[in-house]
Image (tube, grey):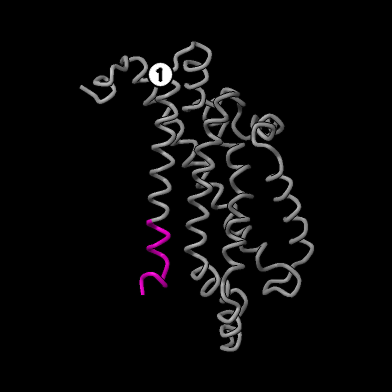
Amino acid sequence: MSLLSLLGISPQISGLLVEATLETLHMTAVSGGIGTLLGLPLGVVLATSGRGELLQWVGFNRVAGLVVNATRSTPFIILVVAIIPFTRMIAGTSIGTTAAIVPLTVAAAPFIARVVENAIREVDQGLIEAAKAMGATPLQIVRKVLIPEAMPGIVAGLTLALVSLIGYSAMVGAVGGGGLGDLGIRYGYQRFMPDVMALVVLVLIILVQSVQTIGDYLARRVNKRLMS
């Protein structure tokens, strides 16, 4: 007998809750992974391409900064609706978990880029100057100094991004995106089943707490100052 059965939850609701949780994990993991692949290099470039920076590329820096700011300034639920044609072009549909991954990724990538940019800007300038004095090229400084030194901040930022994505994935349930948000709206709100809504909230809290705990652990593991 499962824990949900012991709590008096019907097999039908138990099945829906498990399915919705898996959908939420799927949306969060895929959009977080793709968002990291896009946001990580973008954040590095944003941090190093400004005037007087290592990889000076002022024009790109300004355009990329504007795009990132515009995307981050748009409320997520409006972003989901506004890019429906783009979502259909990528996923072939605007409904379901696969379609929801598109706006989640669009929201995650610029967020992660800013997180990475901020983490890199906090690296001690003395380390960069020392690397320059030893003859390191700009790319070597980025690869061997900036990214390793910024890694604790990057990991902490990625954790924050995943936590935000869990919240966003629940939000896409309002527009047919599936997952826990969809279950909470269809059963908890529209069918007046407060116990289902409470279960959805409980599972979301557990997911967020689990991601935060793992992220904090990994951030401590990559922090050389704490390990020394």
Image-based side of 11 in relation to 94, left or right: left
Outermost residue toward the left in this view: 1
Percent x, y of residue 141: 57, 76
Percent x, y of residue 124: 57, 76
Tell me which residue sits at (41%, 38%) in the image: 207
Magenta span dominant secondary structure: helix
- Residue 50 magenta-drawn? no
Outermost residue toward the right in this view: 59
- Residue 227 magenta-drawn? yes
Residue 182 higher or lower than 80, as above or below: above
Image-based side of 27 in relation to 14, left or right: right
Which quadrant would residue 115 be assigned to in this image?
A: bottom right
Count the marks: 1
* Dot 1 amino acid type: Asp
* Label 1 sits on residue: 195
Tell me which residue sits at (49%, 36%) in the image: 27
Tell me which residue sits at (60%, 48%) in the image: 109
Image-based side of 121 in relation to 30, left or right: right
Tell me which residue sits at (57%, 85%) in the image: 130
User: Which region is colored magenta?
Assistant: 217-228
> What SS does tag 1 mark?
helix
